[in-house]
Amino acid sequence: MSELSTLILDRIRDVPDYPQPGVLFKDITPLLADHVAFSAVVDEIARLCANVDKVIGMEARGFILAAPAAYRAGAGFVPVRKKGKLPAETFEAAYDLEYGSAVIEIHRDALAPGDRVLIVDDVLATGGTARATVDLVRQTGAEVTGVAVLMELAFLKGREQLEGVDLHSLVIV
């Protein structure tokens, strides 16, 4: 296991039965509170942002990782939000997650055709949110260079939703 993987895994707290019974929630707040760990994660994601125009953060914890990585990489930051949270015209996509379903949106003018985009989130679980975000980016005419996640929950097989997309998982559990 790499030094970065150990740093990450030592700072992720398991919370059973949250947000509902049977779900084991991976809480990243201890990692975010640790300057050394948080900086290492942001630096690694920023390294993946080489040659991208925009970095997308998926609501809500993806914002925390994507915005500083975009800043460090000299790229723009674009939020993908839950339905009804963005004020201007949007594209939207519905998706299923491990404990329900939802709709996400992106501003229609957030990306330009040909923009190179890295999508960032904290956890890849079933892959529904990431797949929907890839589809949203493609609706704008931009190019998805990859998806980067702090942690991939391999047992939920989210990777299967992203076939043909370059996936970077800092840790896989």
Image (spheres, grey):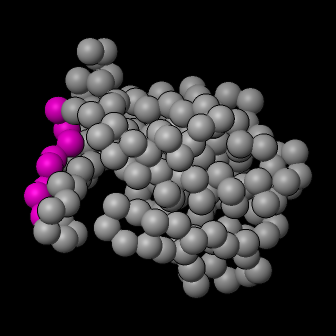
Q: Position of residue 161 (x, y in %)?
A: 53, 46
Q: Position of residue 117 (x, y in %)?
A: 71, 44
Q: Position of residue 79 (x, y in %)?
A: 60, 62
Residue occupying image coordinates x 70% and y 36%: 145
| Magenta segment includes 15 | yes
Q: Is residue 136 above or below residue 33?
A: below
Q: Quadrant of the C terminus?
A: top left
Magenta segment boundaries in residue numbering: 10-17
Q: Is residue 8 above or below residue 102?
A: above
Q: Nearer the viewer, residue 23 or 140?
A: 23
Residue occupying image coordinates x 20% and y 47%: 30
Residue occupying image coordinates x 22% and y 33%: 9
Residue occupying image coordinates x 23% and y 23%: 6
The residue lying furthest to the right in this view is 113
Residue 77 in the figure: left or right of residue 11: right
Q: In the figure, residue 108 lies in which quadrant?
A: bottom right
Q: In the figure, residue 47 lies in which quadrant?
A: top right
Q: Position of residue 157 (x, y in %)?
A: 39, 42
